[in-house]
Amino acid sequence: MFLLVLGVLGLVLPVLQGGLFLLLGVFVLRDQYAWSRRCLGWCHARWPRQMDRMDGLEARLLDRGRAWGRRLGFGPGG
């Protein structure tokens, strides 16, 4: 929710990137709220290549986090 508040503030303040914070807030909340999933669906229809790149980045970061967790002894195989 904090990212959404920053996004709204960024829409009026020239110092903050409002759109970026709004998109990040919606991305973080996508699994919790239907309106957030709809918003990301609209973004995917509007900018499919960029959204696919964002999904790929998320997958790579999750894989890297799991590998670090295994290396540190957390989770399965650790």
Image (spheres, helix red, strand yellow):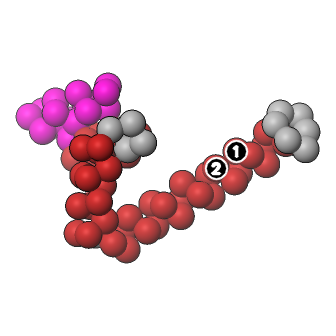
Assign a secondary structure to mark 2: helix
Measured from the top left, where is residue 67 in percent x and y? 79, 48
- Numbered label tally: 2
Q: Which residue: 53% across, 64% down?
A: 56
Quadrant into which the N terminus falls:
top left
Q: What is the secondary structure assignment of the residue under circle 1?
A: helix
Query: In the rendering, at what x and y percent does residue 31 appear?
Result: 42, 42
Residues 68 and 33: in front is: 33
* 46 relative to 65 in the view: left or right: left
Mark 2: few/some/many CA within 10 Å (<14, 14-19, 20+): few
What type of secondary structure mainly makes up the magenta span?
A: helix
- The residue pinned by badge 1 equals 65
Camera-nearest residue between 15 and 51: 51
59 up-or-down from 48: above or below: above
Q: Are marks 1 and 2 in contact (CB under 8 Å)?
A: yes
- Residue topped by disc 2: 62
Dot 1, how many residues are within 10 Å of its Cα: few (below 14), some (14-19), or many (20+)? few
Q: Amino acid at mark 2?
A: Leu
Q: Looking at the picture, does residue 55 appear above or below residue 28?
A: below
Using the rendered view, name the quadrant where residue 73 is placed: top right
Question: Is residue 17 visible in the rendered structure shown here?
Answer: no
The kind of residue on which mark 1 rests is Gly
Q: Locate residue 4, reporting x and y percent.
A: 26, 33
| Left or right position of 54 against 3 | right
Look at the image and tell me in which quarter the C terminus lies: top right
> Farthest residue in the bottom direction?
49
Q: Horizontal placement of 73 versus 50: left or right?
A: right
- Residue range in magenta is 1-18
Check residue 68 for magenta coloring. no
